Image (cartoon, grey):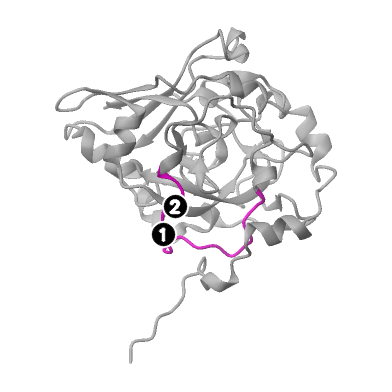
Amino acid sequence: MLIKIKKGWELPESAATPESTFLKRRSLLKGLAAGPILAATAGLLSGCDGENSQTAQAADSEPDPSAGLYPVQRNLRYRLDREITSEELATTYNNYYEFGSSKNIWQKAQALPLRPWTVQIDGMVEAPIEIGIDDLLAKMPLEERVYRHRCVEAWSMAVPYSGFPLKALVDMARPLGSAKYLKMVTFKDESVASGQKASWYPWPYVEGLTIEEANNELSFIATGLYGKPIPKQNGAPLRLAVPWKYGFKHVKGLVRFEFTDKRPVSFWEEIQGSEYGFWANVNPEVPHPRWSQATERLLGVDERVPTLLYNGYGEFVADLYSGLQGERLFI
């Protein structure tokens, strides 16, 4: 008889709480457990998504041309040990420094035009590619995945992303064997993103992964959220989701994928490299220089839970870091 041993992150599909039920019985958290610490460091806390007491109303006057692609089928390989965070919370309290340092930037983000949107794939590849977002989506195998999201600010959520494996884009790009890293770059447009007028930030926002990380099955490009096109404040039209890493690695509004043999210096690493490194893997035993990472606050629930190594995805990613003991892998 074949006996299946469930993984630590698995639960029956029947145990997942529907979003509608959760919305009816959730209670909004009125304060941050780590408020005094986080308020003092708001200027340096990086790109994560979260909560707000306001409701995100439909601020877009133009419909998203990709709306007909969603919802897509959920991949049941990626299940969770917690309830899905309500859509209201996940879409109304967002860090997006391109639009300002306030958490309440979802309204400002509606100014971002999503069409035309062109993506460049270049660097150490067989042939550079320039492709429109809708043509790119037509080529990619779209699916839905429910992922944990762990912010460096010590809160977390669980959301249903739609999109495609980053490996599918890597395969399309056909990088050379000498390419060791994937550098990702966001849009730059001061006319709609007022935060980019702040000259002390190194715009555009840059992030990077090793080729091995980019090809890992968990690495995902999110194009949808809650069965719809992903909202602008959450990173439309293309956003990285690497759930074993802190949220500031989850770069939004992507316009370029560059394959290179040099490790990219990421946005927050350039600003404050002693606090935000290249790897940024979640580890409860390695504190941020100014606060603990041992526990996290679940958005929408007055509860703190222990943080898991690699955010609970160790069985997928731990082997990526074998032999890198000399590296600063966490934070």
Image quadrant assignment for residue 105: top right
Q: What amino acid is found at the position of numbered circle 2 in the picture? A: Glu
Q: Tell me which label, 2 or 1, sits earlier in the chain.
A: 1
SS state under label 2:
strand
Q: Position of residue 189 (x, y in %)?
A: 50, 11
Residue placed under numbered mark 2 in the picture: 144
Q: Position of residue 226 (x, y in %)?
A: 55, 48
Q: Is residue 329 visible?
A: no
Give the crowd class for mark 2: few <14, some 14-19, many >=20 residues within 10 Å.
many
**Disc 2 and disc 1 in contact, CB within 8 angstroms:** yes
> Which residue range is magenta in the image?
69-86
Between 195 and 264, the residue placed more toward the observer is: 195
**Magenta stretch contains residue 74:** yes
**Magenta stretch contains residue 213:** no
Q: What amino acid is found at the position of numbered circle 1 in the picture? A: Asn
Instruction: Pick the quarter of the image with the N terminus.
Output: bottom left
Residue placed under numbered mark 1 in the picture: 75
SS state under label 1:
loop
Q: CA distance from mark 2 to mark 1?
A: 6 Å
The residue at the point 36 percent across, 55 percent down is 319
Instruction: Pick the quarter of the image with the C terminus.
Output: top right
Q: Position of residue 120 (x, y in %)?
A: 31, 22
Q: Is residue 66 visible?
A: yes
Between 229 and 298, the residue placed more toward the observer is: 229
